[in-house]
Image (cartoon, rainbow, N blue to C red):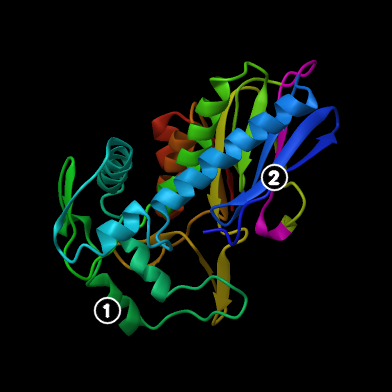
Amino acid sequence: MTSGAPRLQLHRQRGLWRATFAAMANPCEVLCDGSDEPSARRIGELAMREAIRIERKFSRYRTDSVVHEINASDGRPVLLDDETADLIDFGETLWRLSEGAFDLTSGVLRHAWRFDARAAAPSAQLIAELLERIGWRRVSWRRPQLMLPRGMEIDLGGVGKEYAVDRVVAAIQRVTDAPVLVNFGGDLRATGPPRGQAAWQVGVESASTRGQAEQVIQLSVGALATSGDTRHCIEANGKRYGHIIDARTGWPAADAPRSVTVAADTCTQAGAYATLAMLQGRNAERLLQEEGVQFWCLR
């Protein structure tokens, strides 16, 4: 959850309007082409409102969110609205595709893993204790009714940011056909290339090139999502631990790439492929090749 009321900043950059704000603990931006300043501001404010709506509805940190209602249900059934039910359905699909490595109930592992410079790797005992509170198999989900066992939690953070990008793009497309690029913390989607250009230039960084692009991807329309340890990792006992955690073990996926970037029609699809690939570890590239998606892996 962002602190205080979000503020929109708008300025001109290389012939484009750039609207920026903070949401979901990430820097967010919307690049607008072919718009005057009042129109660009309206687009930016529309994007910010939708992003904040989604954050407020699905944040695990707010006491007025649907996720808090579920987590505080104490084993009682909760009836969900269609939007929330769609996200639960999507999370269940990812759980099946990953054979349990992705799990909406694995958010409790945040009590073991803190990815900042001063954090240490957790103990095996703590991981074992938390694993007792994880397991989608134990959840009763019969749309629209969800019943979460007492002591368990769900966390939609693994799908929320990419979902927000897609919802923001849909909202913008209802009011303008001007080309825009929506970028929430490196997960992005374009509705078309800027005028006079074939594509947007998107830089992807790695841990060894923080602040600089390891590679530049040409994106004319569609989405890109990146999963990796560029900004969220710790080094302890001579080992590097990334933040993509296998819910079955409670530990980061072994032998995973440093980052995976995937192109798809929507940001939600791209993010799903990127996360599933990271959870495959050494077999990340094989999964993406079998799925026939365009991707870039850094190891």
Question: Image check: 254 left or right of 42?
Answer: left
The residue closer to the viewer here, 288 or 211, is 211
Residue 24 percent across, percent down from the top left? 53, 53
Residue 284 % position (x, y) = 45, 47
Side of 280 relative to 187 (left or right): left
Q: Which mark is on residue 129?
A: 1
Q: CA distance from mark 2 to mark 1?
A: 43 Å
Q: Is residue 273 above or below residue 229?
A: above
* Horizontal arrangement in the rendering, residue 197 relative to residue 14 (left or right): left
Residue occupying image coordinates x 24% and y 69%: 133
Q: Considering depth in this image, is 176 or 100 the residue closer to the camera?
A: 176
Q: Secondary structure at mark 2?
A: loop
- Residue 197 included in the magenta stretch of the image: yes
Would you say 83 lies left or right of 229 here? left
Q: Nearer the viewer, residue 37 or 94?
A: 37
Q: Is residue 102 visible?
A: no
148 vs 236, nearest the viewer:
148
Quarter assignment of residue 63: bottom left
Q: Amino acid at mark 1?
A: Glu
Label 1 neighbourhood size at 10 Å, few (<14), some (14-19), many (20+)?
Answer: few
Residue at numbered disc 2: 8
Give the mark nearer the N terminus: 2 vs 1.
Answer: 2
Which quadrant of the structure image shows residue 249? bottom left
Q: Label 2 amino acid?
A: Leu
Residue 287 among those drawn in magenta: no
Compared with 223, 146 (above or below) is: below
Residue 258: percent from left, percent from top: 57, 55
Q: What is the magenta range?
A: 194-208
How far across and how far down the image is residue 234, in percent?
56, 72
The answer to whether residue 195 is above or below residue 25 is above
